[in-house]
Amino acid sequence: MKYLLVEVMERDISAPIFFDTHEEAHSEMCQRVADVLGVDKAEIVESYLSGEDYNDQTCVIENAAWTERFGNNFDWKIFAQNDAGEFII
């Protein structure tokens, strides 16, 4: 199984990145949320592990995350790809 991370800022869709594990994809997603907000990744991970939104405009869940900064909406989604090459949504 492979995992694909997709990032969208407003209508700008970044090139997807493949990972070997869900943990790697999720870690990168948390890092990107932290980078957008200008905070330490550990703060984002802590909010995820506690099951709480980071703030009223930022949420990280198992396969997705979203936030808003400077009027721009940021979204991330992790897709799983099975050995047959099919994406599992």
Image (spheres, rainbow, N blue to C red):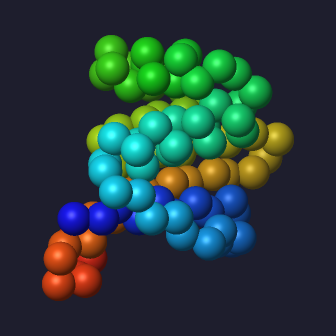
Residue drawn at x 72%, y 39% is: 36
Residue 47 rendering spot, x and y as whole percentages: 43, 19
Q: Is residue 65 above or below residue 84?
A: above
Residue 44 rendering spot, x and y as whole percentages: 52, 24
Residue 89 seen in render: no
Residue 11 rendering spot, x and y as whole percentages: 68, 71
Q: Is residue 21 above or below residue 62?
A: below
Q: Is residue 68 left or right of residue 55?
A: right
Viewport quadrant of the C terminus: bottom left
Q: How many marks?
A: 0
Residue 42 rendering spot, x and y as whole percentages: 53, 17
Q: Is residue 74 left or right of residue 66?
A: right
Residue 32 seen in render: yes
> In the depicted view, which residue is nearer to us: 88 or 73?
88
**Farthest right residue in view:** 70
Q: Is residue 6 left or right of residue 72?
A: left
Residue drawn at x 40%, y 44% is: 24
**Farthest front residue in view:** 20
Residue 15: quarter of image: bottom right
Q: Is residue 79 above or below residue 60?
A: below
Residue 14: quarter of image: bottom right
Q: Is residue 33 left or right of residue 78?
A: right
Residue drawn at x 58%, y 24% is: 41
Residue drawn at x 41%, y 58% is: 19
Viewport quadrant of the N terminus: bottom left
Q: Is residue 33 above or below residue 55?
A: below
